[in-house]
Image (cartoon, coloured by chain):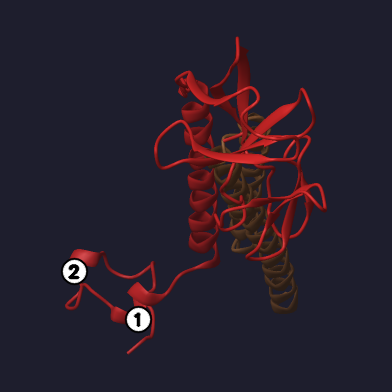
Amino acid sequence: MPLLRSPSKEPLWKDEFSVFTSDERYVTRRQFTQFLTLASLGMFVGNLWILVKAYFAKAPSFPSVAVAEMGEIPVRGVKLFTYPTERDHCILIRASEEEYVAYSQKCTHLSCAVYFSAKEDRLECPCHRGFFSVKDGSVLQGPPPRPLPRITLERDGARLLAVGVKGS
Amino acid sequence: MANLERYKQRRGLVAVDGAMALIVILLIVQIWLLSATLETFLAGHTGAVPPAAIFSGLAVLGCLALNLFVTRVDRESRKP
């Protein structure tokens, strides 16, 4: 009995056994190449799907929330708050007399809470020694892949308002 | 004559194997591209999405061209 069916033989319906198990398991190079090309097409469809999602993605809207009074925290001091929801912890830093910056407290590596090191003038993640710049939240050292999301601040008289999140 | 046939078949087989290897490389690049694009998209950065889609489309075209090449070589090497 031959291992594989010869295509030049009798038609399939004339065969006594119409299904050859070994024949079914046999994959030609051409079939395999077609399968790979189909998989490649699938990857492209995935990329197109992301493109469509990115095109139709709506810009998130953020509430305006008072997070501190102007003289409430000392220079080089910090205040913790939550924004935009109660579950999003943030850190407000008074970098100089007139300069306030705020960042998400969640490290972009594995979401540990970062703290402000006034001595080193940087934000530090204690879990894996990831350091961020106080000026713009960029990664100075360590495993974090992205800068810290920055909270946009506005002054409203003596109040400091959080009005948005950049890079979340 | 039989030697010539065998030589043609072997040559065709080498060409098909080479084309398959190239398709596999393109597919690996596409898999990496898709995962990297998804990662940046979920992180809120959309700047890399359009070029990634273009390169992925070019890779598909490359795969299709190689597929046609494999089909043609296979057909020619089987000619009596």
Q: CA distance from mark 1 to mark 2?
A: 19 Å
Where in the figure is residue B50, as x and y percent of width and height?
Answer: 63, 29
Helix, strand or loop at mark 2: helix
Quarter assignment of residue A98: top right
Q: Residues within 10 Å of mark 2 (few under 14, many from 20)?
A: few
Quick check: A33 above or below A89? below
Residue A103, picture quadrant: top right
Which residue is at a point 55% across and 66% down the rendered structure image? A29
How crowded is the residue under tag 1: few (<14 C-alpha within 10 Å), some, or many (20+)?
A: few
Name which residue type carries label 2: Lys
Residue on which the image places disc 2 = A14
Residue A50 percent coordinates (x, y) = 51, 35
The quarter of the picture where the C terminus of chain A appears is top right
The hue used for chain B is brown
Residue A163: where, in percent of width, then height?
A: 54, 20
Question: Which of A96/B46 is in front?
Answer: A96
Query: In the displayed structure, does residue A63 sit left or right of residue A93?
Result: left
Q: Quadrant of residue A134?
A: top right
Residue at the image position 18 percent from the left and 65 percent from the top = A13
The answer to whether A47 is drawn above or below residue A58 in the figure is: below
Residue nearest the observer in this picture, A72 or A67: A72
Give me the disc on residue A22. Answer: 1
Q: Nearer the viewer, mark 1 or mark 2?
A: 1
